[in-house]
Image (cartoon, coloured by chain):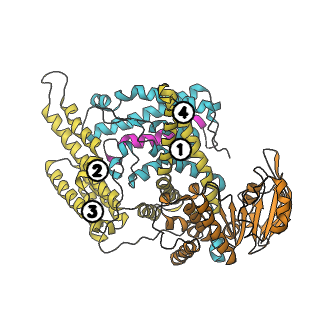
Chain colours: A orange, B yellow, C cyan
Amino acid sequence: MIEFRSVSYAFEDVPVLDELSLSIGDGEFVVLAGANGSGKTTLLRHCNGLLSPDEGTVLVDERPVEDDLVAARSSIGMVFQHPRDQFVAATIDADVAFGPENLGLERAEIDRRVDAALEAVNMTGRGDERIDSLSGGEQARVAIAGALAMKPTHLVLDEPFTGLDEPARRSVLSRLESLSARGTGVLLATHDLRDVLALADRVVAMRDGRVVLDDAPDRALEELGGLEVRVP
Amino acid sequence: MLSYEPDDTVVHRLDPRSKLAFQIGFAAAALAHATPRALIALTGLCAVVLAAARVPIRETLYAYRLAVAVLAFVPLVAAVTFGPPWIDVDDGIVSARASYRVFLILLVSAAYVRSTPVRHSRAAIQRTVPGKPGQILGVGVALVFRFFPVLQADLRTIREAMAARLGDERGPVERASTIAILGLTRTFERADRLALALQARCFAWNPTMPPLTFSRSDVPVLGLSGALVLAAFL
Amino acid sequence: MDTHRESVEVVDDAVVRSFARAALLAALIGAAAPVSIPLPFSPVPITLQVLFVFLAGLVLGPVWGPISILLYITAGAAGLPIFAEMRGGIGVLVGHTGGYLWGYLIAAGLIGLLVHRGTDLRDPAEEPLPVVVVALVAGTIVIYGLGAGYMAWLLELDAWEAFLAGVAPFIPGELLKMAAAIAIVKSGRIAPIQS
């Protein structure tokens, strides 16, 4: 459960989030839509304490994020734009192990988690491969595996399709679909809603740091036109 | 170019810490003694190491070609004297022996490079250097290996773009500073994104250590390394 | 799970950012190794690397600048081919050019100390020009002093021979690199992390 309670945040005196409130339940698949500059990225970075609100509170599992950063960061698996800049190791398995190693887990448990995470993104048995030799879509999937190895309750993704071609985009989407089906919550920020709405339980749209729409996808569709998002 | 090559030699199976200790011992002994007898013994030891790690000699000499050329050239510089007799052969021979031992040290480290993947080096660092410095060095080295090809490609792109815009006609200072500014800006953008990803994945001072264990075959190597270090003080 | 979480000691935000920049600058110093002009009658080629060593001190300061160089040296020792002429391995550190590498480490620290005068980073673009020039000249003297000095000791050369082989050929190139480093920091396009 991720909960924003009237959160305000300003960057260099320009308000980015404006008394924003939002709640995302466990297992929900939520699409966060909005034009560039509407505050999506800033919102996401509050979920795990990469940014802290000027006013208001963000709670993960009913606990303020800053009270226990480790808990928030292992409950919220985060995947950013540019997967290429998120990897810490040259090979897949060493990179996916990075998160659980930081949690100080036993080596056997780390190995189990790496295997499970790679299986979840459809890359079983490819742990020895070099990350630089992978395609963009495969790199995005490894980045997701790196987040999953922390056993998060929610996966939070910021524009994960940037720079991906169509097959790669579909392969990432189908992984998100199966993760969601297994009970992981997904919060997906994107300005490109093709094929995404069919997977979503809810669509939340932002403008000028506020939530301007929060509805089921079929009802949200007709209202989205005026929000400068790409509609199927 | 010399780099790690997966294989199943004795040297590949050694603990990286033994291999590091051996290199230190070898270098110490070679730097302390440049007598003909010591150089013959070290040459024999070097040959054994290269054979055991299956280091391809020709490729390696090619990789070190500039160093080899320099080490061959330096004794000539040393031999030349100002004033009669103009050439001091003894001076040249002393320098030639000194150069040759450097060549041996380079070859032995080639065996380490050939036989040791970065995860082993990282594990050796984190298990040898305690606390925060060990974590900074270990994770830092992994990051340098990871981002080296990425930044190489960045620099290539920058230089190609400059050449395409007739950048070659500009003066050297302007060219150097343009490449450096663009390279550094792009590198720091990547670093700032990486920093976020590290934080999101709970980058910690006290993670689970990478797995690494000594085996029986490490014992003689460690013994020999100790003997070499001792020999350096004799 | 909770038992583990209690003991996790998370790295501070400002440290993570400085660390990421130091590690990637180390990789950039390595990536700049092939951007070099080998000299036929001298042991050391001119490379853009020294320019980035200057920048490590100027932009990352007296703590993270040297850490960046240390990461560069360690990765090279571990076998990444990032030293001049694309060589790697511990041998290079004690080899004939090893002194220059250790000189980089000290020079980055010295330049950082002279320009920032403490661990709170200043913007080098706003520092008076003479301060930057003195720092760069001092750093260069350290690099070449250690580089040529070690070479002389290792290869049994006398001081004059070492100067001819290891310093003199690079003086014009070094002056150009200092000019480039000053142009870069004065452009104000690279801002240090100020906490």
Q: Which residue is mark 4?
A: B178
Compare residues B208 and A29 and report the one nearer the observer.
A29
Q: Chain of mark 4?
A: B
- What is the secondary structure assignment of the residue under circle 3? loop
The residue wearing badge 2 is B106
Give the amino acid at mark 4.
Thr
Q: Is B118 placed left or right of A158 in the picture? A: left
Which chain hosts label 3? B
Q: Position of residue A177 (x, y in %)?
A: 67, 72
**Magenta range:** C93-119
- Amino acid at dot 1: Gly
Per the image, the residue denoted by label 1 is: C65
The quadrant of the rendering that contains the N terminus of chain A is bottom right
Q: Is residue B68 left or right of residue A165?
A: left
Q: Nearer the viewer, residue C53 or B201?
A: B201
Identify residue type, mark 3. Ala
The residue drawn where x is 82% and y is 44% is A13
Q: Which residue is mark 3?
A: B53
Given residues C193 and A99, the one toward you in this image is A99
